[in-house]
Amino acid sequence: MEALGFGNVLHNGKLTLAIKTADGVLLGAEKGPPTVSALLTAGAEATNALLASARGADLVPEDKLVFGPCVDQPEKIICVGLNYRGHAEEVNSPLPNAPMLFSKFNNALLGHGGTIKLPTHEDERFDYEAELVIVIGRPAYRLSEADALDAVFGYCVGNDFSARGLQFRTPQFLVGKSCDGFAPIGPWLVPADKVSDPDKLDIGCWVNGEQRQGSNTDDLIFNCAKLVSYASATMTLLPGDIIFTGTPAGVIQGYPDDKKVWLKAGDDIVTRIAELGELRFKLE
């Protein structure tokens, strides 16, 4: 049995490991790792053992699943600002000399099909940011760019959802980036060997069916290897850590002031990345 993706779904009232195959979705064995984060911590042998034990198991149709975030307990959620040339141009910012790192917390994680409750008591300037997300698969410290991608387990679709008023209230982005549900990821974590080239993937975002972003990860200023190498230079990356790699042009923040129409309750957001799938969430 070949795993095309790993995810977390709600099953019998708890978050449960799910494995996407060509024929359907396998729910994790009772004695195996309970979630994706546990699987990543356990390592490759646990993954292989789980797949071997699953032969002949009943499969579940994907459209019957209720998803949680495809990585459930990252120690670190690292985000990168101004990492597409087109996005830097639209907000009239010079290209950075080094990756601009900031963070989110685990409360921001949200699964495919989830709903963000907008904190309208604090802000009204809500914005989407379609992003490729890197997921680390083994401990990594001071990796060269040549070796950096060897530490990557896989990739998933993400959206660095943002409250712009809060984000720019101070020089620190955190408060506008880490509200509850502001880091949707999924539905599937796709293994790295199933992705042809993470630096050459079409990426886009749609709001209520209207395309707002459309680009390719070849517009990244700092590519995936550079980001992993740079982050690992000063901190040990651990299995399950995730890196939001930045967003392309087309965000509302980049519009002229008279064209900015911020997101609102009832909006439906779709993020798509080639080879990784489609992430949907709603606002209320």
Image (tube, rainbow, N blue to C red):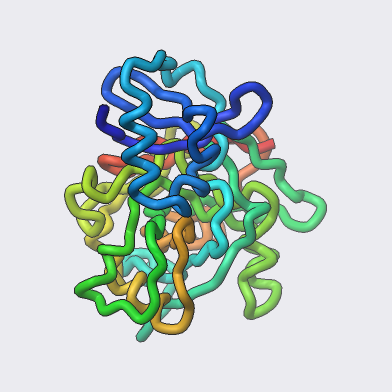
Q: Name the image quarter holding residue 211.
A: top left
Q: Name the image quarter holding residue 222.
A: bottom left
Q: Position of residue 246 (x, y in %)?
A: 41, 63
Q: Image check: 265 left or right of 278?
A: right
**Along the line of sight, the residue nearer the viewer: 255 or 143:** 143
Q: Position of residue 162 (x, y in %)?
A: 59, 57
Q: Name the image quarter holding residue 282.
A: top right
Q: Image check: 152 left or right of 63?
A: left
Q: Image check: 22 left or right of 142?
A: left
**Along the line of sight, the residue nearer the viewer: 49 or 62:** 49
Q: Is residue 226 visible?
A: yes
Query: Where does the C terminus fall, quadrant-wise?
Result: top right
Q: Residue at x 69, y 50 (%)?
A: 180
Q: Residue at x 59, y 49 (%)?
A: 109
Q: Position of residue 36 (x, y in %)?
A: 48, 43
Q: Residue at x 30, y 45 (%)?
A: 191
Q: Is residue 30 above or below residue 127?
A: above
Q: Is residue 268 visible?
A: no
Q: Is residue 243 above or below residue 170?
A: above
Q: Number of numbered discs present?
A: 0
Q: Image check: 202 left or right of 240?
A: left
Q: Residue at x 38, y 71 (%)?
A: 140
**Along the line of sight, the residue nearer the viewer: 184 or 266:** 184
Q: Position of residue 225 (x, y in %)?
A: 27, 69
Query: Where does the N terminus fall, quadrant-wise?
Result: top left
**Along the line of sight, the residue nearer the viewer: 141 or 53:** 53
